[in-house]
Amino acid sequence: MVQKWIRTGFLVRLSHTLLTWTTTLILILHDTDLRRCEEREELLLPALFFLLVVMSVFLYFIVSLMDPGFVLTDTVKGSNEETEAMIPQSATPRLRRCGYCLLQQPMRAKHCQTCRRCVRRFDHHCPWIENCVGERNHRWFIVYLLVQLLVLLWALHIALSGVSPAVSWQLWFRANGFLLAALGLVGVFSAVVLLLLCCHLYLASVNCTTWEFMSRHRISYLKNCGDEENPFDRGVLCNLRDFFCICRTVVWEQIYHRNTANAV
């Protein structure tokens, strides 16, 4: 039973929840701007901060528990015989069969060794959410990163406001120990989340995934393209619109053939 919980990410999700609420509790209990607003009965900012924390935890569980786009059958949604006839096989790399789950992989799908499933438009497996980031939850992953960054930056400001002076270093560390620990933790996570958010916004703007960006030379439909060529790129505005607004399964074989044909 314990091994099953660990395998399903129970401990990871529990750790995230405990860290979030422990840090929030430290900010509330110390003499920070948050505490001073409560004492003055100015509850708007504390309420907004609390709601933002709740929203970040809620989005975390959505991204963590959501189906990232697992390939369930050999039938690619939206690719019937008529659609396949429109795509010349000579122009589009043939779909490969996964050597692990033995399912036919749609273009841009990849098998995740941790989840033991093939994922559509695979980006990466994130150990912090204990789930893959793929076609169905990638946009929500970016929204989660954005909300989490806002929470962390606000918490950083609150923690700095609570650091109090003392007559000696020993007394200073004793008075601010927990607050300094929270400050260090929030500072590290702020830098990591900011870096991740910038990277994923860039990848979304060029219609690329982390896996494609890192392993371009090994991917059959990309290794024969030029170093700067991306057959799925439709321009920044179109890429971002499609990324955040299109919720259906995309037949990437059609887009690949159309763009490569136009390029020729």
Image (cartoon, rainbow, N blue to C red):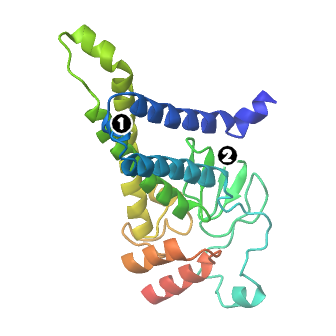
Could you tell me how far apart the alpha carbons at marks 1 and 2 are, in whole angstroms?
Answer: 52 Å
Q: Where 68 falls versus 84 (above or below)?
A: above
Q: Is residue 264 among what the camera can see?
A: no
Q: Secondary structure at mark 2?
A: loop
Q: Residue at x 46, y 89 (%)?
A: 262
Q: Is residue 75 among what the camera can see?
A: yes
Q: Position of residue 111 (x, y in %)?
A: 67, 54
Q: Position of residue 75 (x, y in %)?
A: 78, 73
Q: Which residue is mark 1?
A: 39
Query: In the rendered structure, which amino acid carries the disc numbered 1?
Result: Glu
Q: Which residue is mark 2?
A: 113
Task: Report the residue that reaches farthest toward the left.
Answer: 167
Q: Where 120 falls versus 10 (above or below)?
A: below
Density class for disc 2 (Cα within 10 Å; few <14, some 14-19, many ≥20) is few
Is tag 1's residue or tag 2's residue first in the polypeptide sequence?
A: 1
Q: Residue at x 29, y 41 (%)?
A: 157
